Amino acid sequence: MAYTYEAPLDDMRFVIEHVLRAPASWAACAPFAELDADTGAAVLEEAARFASGVLQPLNASGDLQGCTWAADGSVRTPAGWPAAYRAFVEAGWPALPCDPAWGGQGLPLLLDAALREMLSACNHGWTMYPDLLHGAYETIKAHGSDELRARYLEDIATGRTLAAMALTEPQAGSDLGALCTRAEPQADGSLRVSGSKIFISGGEHDRTGQIVHLVLCREPGMPAGSKGLSLALVPKWLPDGTRNGMHCDGIEKKMGIKGSATCAMRYEAATGWRVGEPGRGLAAMFLMMNSARLHVGLQGLGHQEMAAQNALRYALEREQFRTPIVQQPAVRHALLRLRVSCEAQRVIAYRAALAIDEAHHHADAAVRVRQGRTAALLTPIVKALCTHQGFHGAAAAQQVWGGYGYVHEYGIEQTVRDARIAMVYEGTNEIQAIDLVQRKLLADGGAALAELRHEWLAEAEACAAFPALQDLAAALREQVALAQQGFEALQVAATHDAERPLCVAGDVLAGLSHTLMAWAFAASARAAADHPDPALRQRKTEQMRYGVQWLLPEAAVHWQRASNPALALPALH
Amino acid sequence: MAYTYEAPLDDMRFVIEHVLRAPASWAACAPFAELDADTGAAVLEEAARFASGVLQPLNASGDLQGCTWAADGSVRTPAGWPAAYRAFVEAGWPALPCDPAWGGQGLPLLLDAALREMLSACNHGWTMYPDLLHGAYETIKAHGSDELRARYLEDIATGRTLAAMALTEPQAGSDLGALCTRAEPQADGSLRVSGSKIFISGGEHDRTGQIVHLVLCREPGMPAGSKGLSLALVPKWLPDGTRNGMHCDGIEKKMGIKGSATCAMRYEAATGWRVGEPGRGLAAMFLMMNSARLHVGLQGLGHQEMAAQNALRYALEREQFRTPIVQQPAVRHALLRLRVSCEAQRVIAYRAALAIDEAHHHADAAVRVRQGRTAALLTPIVKALCTHQGFHGAAAAQQVWGGYGYVHEYGIEQTVRDARIAMVYEGTNEIQAIDLVQRKLLADGGAALAELRHEWLAEAEACAAFPALQDLAAALREQVALAQQGFEALQVAATHDAERPLCVAGDVLAGLSHTLMAWAFAASARAAADHPDPALRQRKTEQMRYGVQWLLPEAAVHWQRASNPALALPALH
């Protein structure tokens, strides 16, 4: 049976319009004031046609072909991929959430989130190239000089020029402060950049003529560590039409996303221009971190949806013991767990996108500040939760196919391989957990968490108004209480032992993921209870209740571990 | 840093001699009466040299090359693999646990288990070919005619002839009763076999001239379903030197174990001979099921060990933030979890091998019967637990490498891909859970479980004799109590709802896996407490305590779900 994709447009609309009630929020954001639910839905329908119709058919072939690198440093992407990219640019998709002043469509990040979920589901490798655009756009827009913005920003917003982020060096992965690419300031204000970078997604390719690299580098006299880094914009082609001093020395042979060229780059006295202040390069890049990490979380969500819908289709059709295997309890468990995780995580990820939109554009300044905090807190959870489940959910789905799941032509094994990288890049999931615990929970004394708790308890109350949903409301309240106790215990433990929060960061992230899942189950069931379609009402309620009963109990274990300072973490030799 | 393998010989000896005290058991088994601990250890040292020295260097290259199939039906395995196989046969490894009467070495399955763990760790794909020998040997030895045994058995025992198991057909995977390969009895007592099979590991290759297929097929007039199946021995070359009517129509492109040829086979009026009675083919094959499933569990164990030791080596060497990453709490958690799981599962898997040895050879008939029941109960748990953790443990280890973990040359991504299949073949892990709950727990009213409980409680008492190990003894008693309550609740639930055990089979298997882990933690710590080496004593105790504190709490969630008949499992449409 073919591995195909049908965009979950009804589920997306359900989350956007009924669970999150985004159109009401749009009305309060000046740039989206004219946008209504139907227009948003029409955009997503069009995106779905592109994703299923153009990208998905190129996914398996792209995996088999991979990219090819030639000794002259050029890189060829799989057959059909460059043409699909041209179609993508012509349709205006890269510019969806960008400012109309720079050629963008000015639509909410929330709609862009749904677009990205679809693209990643259908062809993660292909999507890597435009996925980097938005971060580069935000960084240059906020920190680039007028000249750089005039020269590059519209081409990047519209995808006519692609971008690459050049951060990692062999000795500097999570620890960017250790990097040693040099940048010598020149008399004309430019920088001369020299050094080697690895793992540069889309560092070289055949999609666009121009490729703009944002290179993290160190200027002379700057301090060691992460405070001494500058960010340089280094284009493949210089304004005078000559080739810049940058070369792709090879591409990696990877587990998955094989059509995405992961390049080793060498910069030899390449000409670049500073983006932001000298020594403030990392700060400039952190600006785009929230949306970049959200995008990676959306990749995980896309993988889950792809795995879930294909596994269900297979299980409905495949017969063993003279009945479709969907009737076997183990298969039902696997499919329900996938479906429920995916739908709840869509609510959570889209909630984060909405928070970013409101943080940027809401008319009320207090709302902007509060939603900014919420976005910051949700982002590491969305990244780690959705990508963890993207990989593990796909691997669980693979089991539904039996032996066929291990064979390339059935599709799911590629999803498993592709999904694995999202747990690593844009900060490993372990880094997300540290970010959550140190910067988003402990640093503000729990203020951002308290705001979310308020939202969760309001949802519990709204949900409890429906007599049939008392159990979901109670489960949410219980999870909120667990989270609160766990957080308080963590605060106490942190005062006694500074390493303790790091020792339990993974459990704290998993614990709060369950709180958010409980919130999403309640919010979805509550929204469904108000929905006119009785079949949807029954299905959502049954499935969210499955989530409450079978998925939430694990939370207590995470909070137990997070709260018990007596648990020892021995050293290893 | 190179991905290499150092056989954990000290850990293996620790389990065999100190935890399980196997040499005392060998003394009570006539065929092993002359075997002592040092001889056993010498065999394993020799095996380790072969695995690390010959097989491991062929692992990554074999993955890159894969197998090639030609239109004439021939299959070529990766460079160096056939020569390694000849060396393996010449050294006598295939025959390790076989009867000396048929050219075997007559050594315990327990030592063969350690050998297989090492082979799979170093090169899972390569090991697939000889892995099938032992099952074929057991089946033909027990059910073959004198003529078949005289003709094939010694060649199979010694590995001069390789074997394939031809069970699966496109419509018949877990449901073997649905298969339709036909076998027409001939006047001379032979069978004429026609039909198509898929997923036949080693159905065709360049390792040995002769390949013997054991083909599950249906004779005319036999009932539909699994009771009407016969087993036919179908050799590639007939006794008169002519080629039999069997063809390899292609090989699968798989996620991993790419050097293992997974063949689509076509039998066209192929000549074969019945093994066992007509219509009793499945029963003949089930004989070898315990050891075949144990072997797959050992593959998972090998993957864990390979991942754990390479991740530790990498974490000790790789520096970020100017310190080796092994000091980061998240990395320590990942490494400890891997190490502790691996060591506990080695105890459990080797315990199952010892049970099979005693079931076959112990002088006391009552012990033979009891150990047979224990082996039957442990087997599905070992298969599912070790392979689940083989894949998930390898994927967790992969995280330690950061981005490098996604790149082929660092080795771990291949381990993840290879490990995935073991959760599927020889009965999916979901089938193991059903086997455990229906046939091994409920069918005998809990008698086999009661015998194991007795053993667990005795271990808790032995462990409690050491004042420093009270917590491990208490944790074991708590886990045994949870398992007992959970089992009793399951018995009650099964009387009210026949589907209930199937709905919670996965949780029951996970719950009992934790009981066994708790037993292995206590038994290892107790054995270490008696050990002369103080460094080993401290390390094992610390690590087993880590297991108790961080891994066991999840058990309660599994038993909760397994015991609560109110949890609903909705249908899917």
Image (tube, coloured by chain):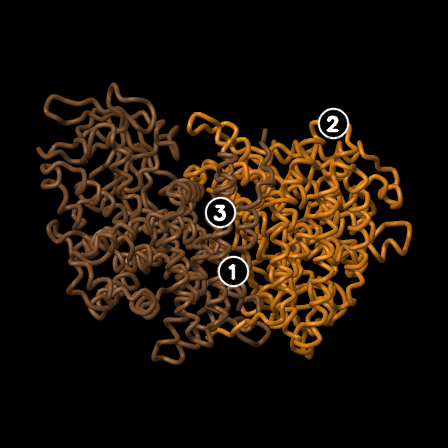
Chain colours: A brown, B orange
Q: What element carries label 2?
A: loop
Residue at (84% x, 56% y) in the render:
B370
Taking the image as drawn, is residue B61 in sight? no
Residue at (54% x, 31% y) in the render:
B313
Label 1 lies in what chain? A
Instruction: State the residue position of label 2.
Output: B533
Q: Is residue B168 left or right of residue A487?
A: right
The nearer-to-camera label among 1 and 3 is 3
| Image quarter of residue B30 | top right
Q: Which amino acid does label 2 sit on?
A: Asp
Residue B124 in the image, given as x and y percentages of width and height: 58, 45
Q: With respect to residue B354, does A189 lie above or below?
A: above
Q: What residue type is labelled 1?
A: Leu
Instruction: State the residue position of label 3.
Output: A488
Label for residue A552?
A: 1
Q: Nearer the viewer, residue B202 or A400?
A: A400
Q: Which amino acid does label 3 sit on?
A: Glu
Q: In this view, does A116 lie to the left or right of A319?
A: left
Measure the C-alpha gap from mark 1 to mark 3.
20 Å
Within 10 angstroms of label 2, few (less than 14), some, or many (20 or more) residues?
few
The nearer-to-camera label among 2 and 1 is 1
Within 10 angstroms of label 3, few (less than 14), some, or many (20 or more) residues?
some
Measure the C-alpha gap from mark 2 to mark 1.
44 Å
Taking the image as drawn, is residue B213 in sight? yes
Residue most toward the top? Answer: A221
Q: Nearer the viewer, residue A142 or A274?
A: A142
Q: In this view, does A274 lie to the left or right of A438?
A: left
Exactly how many numbered labels are in the figure? 3
Marks 3 and 2: CB-CB under 8 Å? no
Q: With respect to residue A536, does B385 lie above or below?
A: above
Q: Nearer the viewer, residue B193 or A462?
A: A462
Residue A27 in the image, given as x and y percentages of width and height: 19, 64
